Image: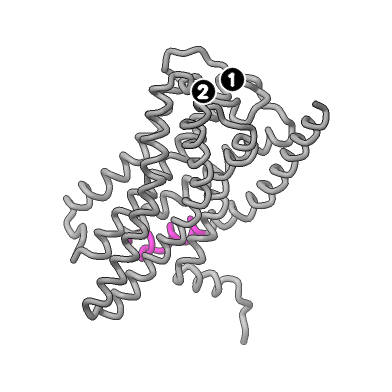
Amino acid sequence: MSNISNSTISLNRVKFGVFLTLQIPSAICSLYLIFQYATRPTLYQSIHNHVIIILLCSSFIFVAIPISASEAFFFTEHVRPESDLFCAIWTWIHYSINISNLILMAFACMQRHWLVFRLNPLHTRLDRILYHYIPITICMIYPWIFYFIFIFLYPCKASYDYKKLLCLIPCYFFTHTVANTDTFMNNWIPIFAIPILSSALFIRFLVQKRRMQMEVFRWKRDRRMIIQLLSITTIYVGAWAPLQAATIYDNIFLAGEAPPFVVDYLYTFPYFIHLFYPFVVLLSNPELQRNTNRTIQPQTN
């Protein structure tokens, strides 16, 4: 038992060191990108950048709040303060940002099909409101409302464990109908939709490019949009797929009982999305790269 306890402490200290090492440069990169997007009209006025900017801001909040709370747990091996309210708020913010980003990413994959293959997409104000701003708003707000209801208002007895990350799970998970609905609607649907829609976009783009002679400017613009989307898709699928695969296996073969390695390792995989996201955005956007290079290059006479 002592060896297991020491091993857990060592693992958590390693997690603390890894996340803290990544957190600082990630936060700096996010703030730099937010400044670039906020001060350059050509960037923030482009419709295809809106979801990218929202994901960037929400990932920065996740890095600043839930990851910081997780680091405190990894360092002390205990949730502090020992309060059901603190656990509920931590879980609410953690779940809401993760799922809103996941759903927004799925929407971005779908919207890229319109932006790339439709002539003059969303060219009227009504189109932008109906097919752009309203869907984005729903994707952002829905998870916060959903988890507020089931974490704070759902009639069940809280059973938080202050020795577990995120205080283990909120009590609504013990109602299988609600838990399964949450898992299927908020996790599985978007995580399966993201790679399918992204791959379809890439294949459709290659087929379209062969069939017709596209304008050089439009081809380069669309190629940049698709490369950026595929880059972001890679980190989302890479971080979420192992956890969701384990969840599917648990539900089918273990009656929902997650084995220790899932809790110890896979639960924190989505953290890497938020930590690496700003770097992926920077490296996949040539305009941002040029601005960065001009900023850091020494002035020469």
Quadrant (top left/top right/bottom left/bottom right) for the N terminus? top right
- Compared with residue 218, is residue 252 higher up or lower down, i.e. above or below? above
**What type of secondary structure mainly makes up the magenta span?**
helix
> Residue at label 2?
170
> Mark 1 or mark 2, which has the lower sequence index?
1
Residue 125: mark: none
> Residue at label 1?
160
Q: Please state the horizontal and vertical placement of residue 35, each as a whole percent of the image.
A: 49, 58
- Going 34% across and 65% down the picture, which residue do you hit? 202
Q: Please state the horizontal and vertical placement of residue 181, each as a whole percent of the image.
A: 37, 29
Quadrant (top left/top right/bottom left/bottom right) for the C terminus? bottom right
- Going 20% across and 46% down the picture, which residue do you hit? 130
Q: Residue furthest right?
A: 2
Q: Which residues are magenta?
A: 33-46
User: In this rendering, would 212 be left or right of 148?
Assistant: left
Badge count:
2
Colour scheme: one colour
- Compared with residue 202, is residue 235 higher up or lower down, i.e. above or below? above
Tag 2, which secondary structure?
A: loop
Residue in front for this viewpoint, 119 or 264: 264
User: In this rendering, would 185 be left or right of 94?
Assistant: left
- Going 36% across and 65% down the picture, which residue do you hit? 42
Q: Please state the horizontal and vertical placement of residue 172, each as a whole percent of the image.
A: 46, 20
Callout 2 amino acid: Pro
Q: Are marks 1 and 2 in contact (CB under 8 Å)?
A: yes
- Going 59% across and 20% down the picture, which residue do you hit? 160
Callout 1 amino acid: Tyr
Q: Is residue 165 magenta?
A: no
Q: Is residue 37 magenta?
A: yes
